[in-house]
Image (spheres, rainbow, N blue to C red):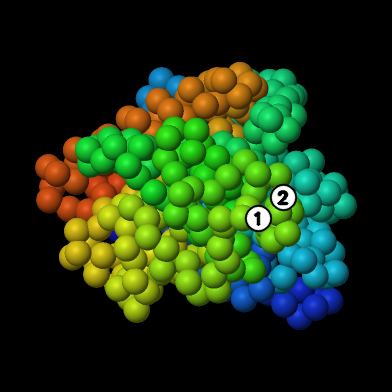
Amino acid sequence: MSAGRGSYLSVTWTDEVTGREGYLVVDRLIRGLASGGLRMRDGCTVEEVRGLAEAMTRKEALNYTPGARYIPLGGAKGGIDCDPRSDEAQGMLTRYLVAMGPYLERVWATGEDLGLTQTMIDRAVADAGLESSIQALDPYLDDPDRAKARLAAGFAVTVDGVGLDTLVGGYGVAAAALVALDQLDRPRAATRAFIQGFGSMGGATARYLVKAGVAVVGVSDADGVIANPDGLDVEHLLRHRDHLGAIDRSALGAADTQLPRDAWLDVDAELLVPAAVSYAIDAVDADRVRAGLVVEAANLPVTPPAEAALTARGVTIVPDVVANSATNSWWWWTLFGDIGPTADEAFARIDTAMGDLVGRLFDRSAKDGTTLRAAAHAIAEENHADLVERWGRRRPADLG
């Protein structure tokens, strides 16, 4: 998985109706399979999708547990250049899935990502005449119907009225942040957090940080920043956001203040969680980061030049391939039967996985004298090599 090694497959598709493009990048294969979500956003590029596919390869490999039923896959990613709120979105999504049908049938298992919900994907899958967005995995399941019923049961679970599937990602980010705070000997009760983005990932991260005793002093959405130095009432804000994470400003508390959207790095906090878009912190923005710990909930939110500048200042960054991996892992743990479709089993498994993985990152980083990201990449390289040696890259011949 070294830089510049090239992807296994890259497909660019042009929609005959809108003229816009969609992309699929399969970075690597294990047993002929790759996993990675499908995103939709205005301005999505093949370069963005390629970077995300490479990250998925690492994310899968990092969650390798020998002896588990879930054997990690290769990495892939899909992307569609379209505003998901536009009238064109659902139709373009369906046409994209029709075009990518041969890959979905045999190679690529996908699900919701930025701009898309699983409900939107499932509707488009049905309209495209496909069985499911994960049907490529069917030959590897002991009982596909039972496995998919188990996953469907997991999606049906709610916690305080919120779907488990929208909570596990943010729960994992919060768990990673808490382990990192412990590793850095920073008391939770003395830690203030800022969350950029208040959708499913950012909202759940905020919820579970507060439950662990961390004060969330600021959040941002598409309309700007909401801050309170004494801590926001996160549960109240969650009850007054829409499905895209926008907060109803009429519901703010008397002590809550509003700031412009570009002021999200100006709020004093020891923990910063970028949970919105990629490349949110560049080399210029790095000088404005006040936190000593950054935990990447979004994919690729810190650019390499920014990371170099932050590292030079002593800022610790828990990389996205670790921090936001719980959603992907929860899908496969549940599908393959490593856990049952309950919130208790999901959260317990995430706590265990994040405790182990983030702990190993700090140990490896200290041993090698590198950043946590470099440590994550090294562990992923080793795990990926082991997966290839044990399971191979190609689909077994007896499966056709």
Image quadrant for the C terminus? top right
Q: Quadrant of residue 138?
A: top right
Q: Quadrant of residue 234?
A: top right
Evaluate whether residue 371 shows in this view. Answer: yes
Q: Label 2's element?
A: loop
Name the residue at 33% across, 52% down: 270
The residue nearer to you, when weighing 43 against 149, is 43
| Crowd band around label 2 with a 10 angstrom C-alpha radius: few (<14), some (14–19), many (20+) | some
Residue 373 in the image: above or below residue 277: above
Left or right of 84, for residue 26:
left
| Crowd band around label 1 with a 10 angstrom C-alpha radius: few (<14), some (14–19), many (20+) | some
Left or right of 350, for residue 257:
right
Q: Amino acid at mark 1?
A: Leu
The residue nearer to you, when weighing 364 against 27, is 364
Query: CA gap, disc 1 to disc 2?
Result: 9 Å
**According to the image, label 1 marks what residue?**
252
